[in-house]
Image (tube, rainbow, N blue to C red):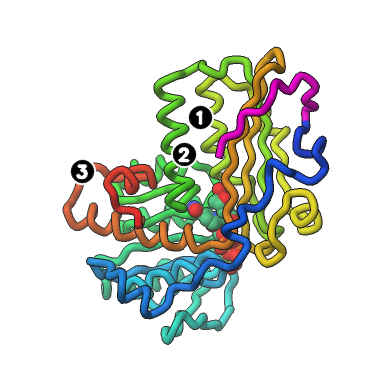
């Protein structure tokens, strides 16, 4: 969403605070209710087209569960194994009628090797934690198992290097939601075509996520990189990160039922002479768009592996461009 306001001659450095409640940051009316769950009926109405084994790493977490559920609804074969950062968890997670067994770090290499022996065409989808991104990717690359990395954070340069050096297949994206991916693609295109068009503009960024989110929004970082190519000036230390539920409710305008799962982003640009401003927002409630996008990503990567595509590293813009997002 883009809004061009009247020349903001008196714009304060913090336009969201100036307004008290973030009127430019209000919850989208259409998502204030929980998104409809995927039912057997909708799942059968939308056949996956392909079926293959999928292992979701991080089934102890919220995204892991959502992706595992979306995968089974789409007819993929959920491997009943996942991992945890904790030893001796002795736990299973129920996904539909499948009991997913959770293994600790010391067992993960042996267990994953056995999974690959049993399911040679398995695709791993990773939704764990920022501090596990690189060690998990190292393991997938060592064992040569193709993976979708939905987890944000970690050392992204090292992540790409691990995949490049191993020649493994991977799809890496901080954002799996189709419409947000399209927005990101548009930003990348504008940045590519009109570098410097926003030269000297000041950028302010606000992101609000559930309190449990450990890192800064990976999506915001990707969008900021585009604004920087366009010439905008941004100081990462001035990113406004909101994790406090009270502020989310009363200042940001997140619907109460989505305090535990939302991703609101606001980017505000102001010209050097304060005469022009732009605002972009993307506000997501719940996790279903990421879960569906993650399954699209796994299907896409599976097809690339099966066709032995020479390109090894993909992102969600590739999936969108090939028309593979539902
Ligand atoms: N790419 C995208 O579109 C999206 C990315 N994310 C990212 O996904 C990640 C997870 O998000 P949530 O599920 O909301 O977090 P969460 O905290 O609910 O779940 C993460 C789970 O991973 C477990 N975990 C940590 N280290 C692990 C390891 N080494 N092996 C196995 N499990 C491990 C944790 O114990 C926890 O249960 C975050 O980095 C988040 O930014 C979230 C939503 C969308
Ligand atoms: O942790 C989340 O929830 C999300 N993480 C991703 C990110 O860091 O960009 C995507 C979305 O913002 C939800």
Asked whether residue 10 is drawn in magenta, I would say yes
* Label drawn at residue 226: 1
Dot 2 or dot 1: first in sequence order is: 2
Q: In this orientation, which residue lies closer to the viewer: 308 or 246? A: 246
Marks 3, 2: nearer the viewer: 2
Q: Residues within 10 Å of mark 1 (few under 14, many from 20)?
A: many
Up-down relation of residue 79 to residue 283 (above or below): below
In this picture, residue 1 sits left or right of residue 242: left
Residue 85 in view here: no
Q: Residue at x 80, y 38 (%)?
A: 19
Disc 1, ligand 2: is the CB inside 8 Å? Answer: no
Work out how far the residue at label 3 is from the one at label 2, CA to CA, in angstroms.
25 Å
Q: Secondary structure at mark 1?
A: helix
Q: In this orientation, which residue lies closer to the viewer: 64 or 161? A: 64
Dot 1 or dot 3: first in sequence order is: 1
| The residue stretch that appears in magenta | 1-13
Q: Residue at x 72, y 64 (%)?
A: 256
- Circles 3 and 2, Cβ within 8 Å, touching? The answer is no
Up-down relation of residue 94 to residue 231 (above or below): below
Q: Secondary structure at mark 2?
A: helix
Disc 3, ligand 1: is the CB inside 8 Å? Answer: no
Residue labelled with disc 2: 184
- Circles 2 and 1, Cβ within 8 Å, touching? The answer is yes
Magenta span main SS:
loop
Residue 112 in picture, x, y percent from top left: 38, 69
Q: Indicate the quadrant where residue 190 lies.
A: top left
Q: Indicate the quadrant where residue 181 lies.
A: top left
Q: In this orientation, which residue lies closer to the viewer: 228 or 46? A: 46
Q: Residues within 10 Å of mark 2 (few under 14, many from 20)?
A: many
- Circles 1 and 3, Cβ within 8 Å, touching? The answer is no
């Amino acid at each position: 969403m883009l809004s061009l306001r009247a020349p903001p001659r008196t714009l304060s450095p913090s336009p969201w605070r100036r307004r008290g409640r973030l009127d430019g940051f209000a919850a989208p009316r259409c998502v204030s209710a929980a998104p409809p769950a995927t039912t057997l009926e909708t799942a059968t109405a939308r056949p996956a087209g392909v079926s293959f084994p999928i292992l979701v790493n991080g089934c102890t977490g919220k995204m892991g569960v959502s992706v595992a559920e979306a995968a089974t609804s789409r007819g993929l074969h959920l491997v009943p194994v996942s991992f945890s950062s904790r030893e001796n968890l002795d736990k299973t997670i129920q996904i539909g009628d499948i009991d997913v067994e959770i293994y600790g770090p010391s067992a993960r290499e042996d267990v994953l090797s056995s999974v690959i022996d049993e399911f040679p065409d398995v695709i791993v989808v990773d939704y764990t934690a920022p501090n596990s991104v690189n060690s998990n990717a190292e393991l997938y690359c060592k064992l040569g198992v193709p993976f979708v990395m939905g987890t944000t954070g970690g050392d992204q340069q090292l992540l790409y290097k691990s995949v490049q050096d191993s020649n493994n297949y991977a799809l890496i994206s901080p954002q799996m939601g189709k419409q947000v991916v399209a927005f990101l693609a548009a930003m990348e295109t504008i940045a590519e075509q009109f570098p410097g068009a926003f030269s000297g503009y000041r950028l302010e960024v606000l992101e609000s996520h559930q309190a449990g989110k450990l890192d800064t929004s990976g999506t915001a970082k990707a969008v900021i990189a585009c604004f920087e190519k366009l010439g905008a000036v941004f100081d990462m230390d001035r990113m406004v990160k909101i994790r406090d539920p009270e502020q989310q409710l009363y200042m940001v305008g997140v619907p109460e039922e989505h305090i535990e799962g939302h991703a609101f982003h606001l980017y505000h640009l102001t010209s050097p002479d304060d005469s022009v401003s732009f605002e972009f927002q993307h506000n997501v409630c719940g996790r279903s768009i990421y879960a569906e996008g993650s399954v699209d990503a796994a299907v896409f990567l599976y097809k690339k592996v099966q066709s032995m595509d020479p390109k090894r590293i993909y992102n969600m813009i590739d999936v969108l461009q090939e028309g593979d997002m539902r």
